[in-house]
Image: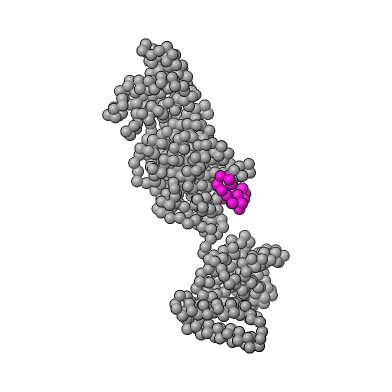
């Protein structure tokens, strides 16, 4: 032993580039800390699968190793026969001497007989199993505290754990990933017992994963991988809600999911109020549609090819005008409907689908049609007055400061693999109208475009839309009818209270089979726990989760996870101002360097 120790300490000395070791009676001093190894000497008699998993999720720094060595069948039969003979002999001797029966002895004999029967019939094999735990700590004092907690955990599992006294070095080596067992403190177990000991069961999701599976991150309980497929047939719908307080990482996760969904063939449309998805769209060759700019003009009167396009456009104009000027009375709706039909007729468009290829009217043409209705002697004075009033109230959108939003007859097609509708350039005065136009264009694209791939509609900062009844109705309709069109709605919001207070918001949540809960504000924690039926542990998790960590709720399945992004993904999805400033500086430097090289090559 002494020669082996001297050889090991010489090989592991810092002079030769390895860690310096100091071996004590029970612990080993390694550079940076101390450690001690515990040996399992007793196991519970009855266990379930994964009973040792709490050791894997212990929050301290420990190493756990299982050394499993198969025993040949002939050797196993001989050992079991001798074991049963000893137990039976001891039992008979105790009976002859009149001593009280030992229940442990009787149980051991029954277990040995059962294992022998399994091996004889080929239903199992015998293994020699050794389990060791090495506990690490920075100091001896801290090590004592960690050892007490680990031994208490082992005691709760009905496991006897003793220190490897005078064999501390062998214990440390046995827990290294070398497959070497120097302690040789194993116990005989059959196949079933070994299978339950291995910690391959943990709080993981159980679902049918298909081609659209996306890796969300790592399991916070088991360090396994959390992968989820919103499009699998086992779910009621393809919708998802992401709820969190501001700054908890909801947009970061949603962009990560979006980017990975694109990689597996999912088409996407994003309603982006703050322009956060523009960098991502430009990097992956998506289409950016900036509402409020000359390139992002929308025509609410533009028709699309569907059997009821004419009627749907007329009804949407009613919804849009109500958002512009306020709720309409029955008479105002009648006058507006007549003006819509007149505006289409002036453009050569009727209910006949063969006329729908003509250039459609714009909002200014609708205002002119209202003026025509007002000057039409066939209508009554009351309707004429209402027509003039409506035309006047629409003037800011037809001749005033908001005219540029509607002065294009044709809409830009949103038929790319990623379409981002940015509302960042919209003034607050017309933001509601712009959001309604964006939702309408998205709904038309979803319901009319033919595709062989799943599609998702991402609505960021959804609380802005849920405040407007018309926009909220669009979201509720998309949540309910999206599955028919192979579409999943992703609703992201930081104002959980507004969602839960809104009837249509609750409808969207109720129709979301996938629910992602990041850190919640203390004021909303109780309502979130009640709405999603969280346990006390899950409530604590979403109330104190680190930034980015989340709880995935899918029916009865619950799992905590932490998103993990590569460096390339992180640069595309981060919204940290400091990181974005560094990225802009690097891009500027690279651009200047390229320009200088071009100039030098030109001079040459």
Residue at 53% across / 53% down in the picture? 558
Give the vertical position of 15 relative to 404 (above or below): below
Percent of width and height locating residue 288:
43, 37
Q: Which residue lies most toward the left here?
A: 354
- In the shown orientation, is residue 116 left or right of residue 301? right
Display coloring: one colour
Q: Is residue 214 above or below residue 51?
A: above
Residue 536 located within the stretch drawn in magenta? yes
Q: Is residue 458 above or below residue 178?
A: above
Q: Residue at x 47, y 29 (%)?
A: 433
Counting every numbered tag in the picture gives 0
Residue 596, image x and y in percent? 47, 42
Q: Please give left or right for residue 415 compared with residue 256 in the image.
A: left
Report the span colored magenta. 528-549
Q: Is residue 447 left or right of residue 5?
A: left
Q: Nearer the viewer, residue 588 or 42?
A: 42
Compared across the picture, whether 79 is left or right of 391 comes to: right
Asked if residue 564 shows in the view, the reply is: no
Q: Indicate the quadrant where residue 528 lies.
A: top right
On the image, the x and y values in percent for residue 332 come to 44, 20
Q: Is residue 271 above or below residue 402?
A: below
Whole-percent x and y of residue 427?
51, 28
Look at 30% across and 23% down and name the residue there. Answer: 348
Out of 49 and 578, give the one closest to the viewer: 49
Question: As drawn, which residue projects farthest toward the right?
Answer: 141
Q: Quadrant of the N terminus?
A: bottom right
Q: Is residue 76 visible?
A: yes
Residue 140 lies in the magenta-colored region: no
Position of the C terminus, as image quadrant, is: top left
- For image coordinates 61% across by 48% down, the residue present is 543
């Amino acid at each position: 032993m002494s020669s082996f120790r001297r050889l090991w300490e010489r090989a592991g000395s810092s002079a030769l580039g390895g860690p310096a070791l100091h071996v004590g009676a029970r612990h080993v001093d390694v550079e940076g800390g101390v450690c001690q190894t515990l040996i399992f000497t007793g196991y519970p008699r009855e266990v379930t699968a994964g009973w040792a998993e709490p050791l894997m999720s212990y929050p301290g720094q420990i190493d756990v190793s299982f050394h499993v060595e198969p025993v040949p069948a002939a050797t196993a039969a001989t050992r079991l026969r001798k074991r049963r003979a000893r137990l039976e002999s001891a039992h008979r001797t105790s009976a002859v001497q009149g001593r009280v029966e030992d229940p442990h002895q009787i149980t051991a004999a029954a277990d040995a007989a059962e294992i022998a029967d399994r091996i004889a019939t080929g239903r199992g094999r015998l293994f020699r199993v050794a389990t060791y735990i090495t506990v690490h700590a920075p100091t001896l004092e801290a090590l004592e505290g960690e050892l007490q907690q680990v031994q208490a955990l082992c005691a709760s599992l009905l496991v006897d754990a003793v220190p490897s006294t005078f064999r501390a070095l062998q214990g440390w080596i046995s827990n290294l990933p070398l497959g070497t067992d120097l302690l040789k403190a194993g116990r005989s177990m059959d196949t079933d017992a070994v299978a339950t000991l291995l910690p391959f069961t943990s709080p993981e999701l159980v679902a049918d994963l298909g081609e659209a599976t996306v890796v969300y991150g790592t399991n916070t309980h088991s360090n396994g991988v959390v992968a989820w497929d919103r499009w699998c047939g086992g779910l009621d719908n393809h919708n998802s809600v992401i709820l969190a307080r501001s700054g908890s990482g909801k947009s970061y996760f949603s962009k990560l999911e979006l980017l990975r969904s694109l990689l597996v063939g999912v088409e996407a449309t994003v309603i982006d109020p703050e322009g956060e998805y523009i960098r991502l769209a430009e990097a992956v060759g998506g289409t950016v549609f900036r509402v409020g700019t000359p390139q992002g003009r929308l025509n609410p009167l533009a028709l699309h090819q569907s059997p009821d396009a004419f009627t749907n456009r007329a009804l949407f104009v009613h919804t849009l005008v109500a958002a512009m000027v306020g709720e309409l009375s029955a008479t105002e709706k009648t006058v507006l409907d007549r003006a819509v039909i007149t505006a289409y007729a002036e453009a050569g468009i009727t209910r006949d689908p063969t006329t729908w290829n003509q250039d459609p009217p714009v909002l200014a043409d609708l205002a002119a049609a209202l003026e025509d209705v007002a000057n039409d002697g066939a209508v009554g004075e009351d309707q004429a007055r209402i027509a003039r009033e409506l035309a006047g109230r629409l003037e800011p959108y037809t001749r005033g400061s908001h005219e540029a939003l509607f002065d294009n007859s044709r809409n830009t097609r949103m038929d790319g693999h990623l379409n981002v509708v940015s509302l960042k350039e919209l003034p607050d005065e017309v933001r509601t109208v712009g959001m309604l136009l964006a939702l309408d264009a998205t709904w038309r694209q979803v319901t009319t475009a033919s595709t062989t791939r799943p599609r998702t509609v991402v609505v960021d900062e959804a609380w802005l839309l849920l405040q407007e009844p018309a926009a909220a109705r669009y979201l509720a309709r998309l949540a309910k009818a999206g599955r028919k069109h192979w579409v999943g709605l992703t609703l992201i919001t930081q104002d959980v209270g507004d969602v839960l207070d809104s009837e249509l918001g609750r409808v969207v949540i109720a129709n979301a089979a996938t629910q992602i809960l990041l850190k919640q504000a203390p004021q909303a924690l109780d309502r979130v726990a009640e709405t999603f039926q969280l346990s006390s542990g899950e409530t604590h998790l979403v109330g104190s989760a680190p930034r980015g960590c989340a709880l995935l709720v899918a029916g009865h399945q619950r799992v905590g996870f932490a998103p993990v992004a590569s460096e390339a993904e992180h640069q595309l999805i981060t919204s940290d101002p400091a990181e974005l400033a560094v990225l802009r500086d690097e891009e500027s430097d690279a651009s200047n360097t390229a320009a200088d090289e071009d100039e030098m090559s030109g001079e040459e």
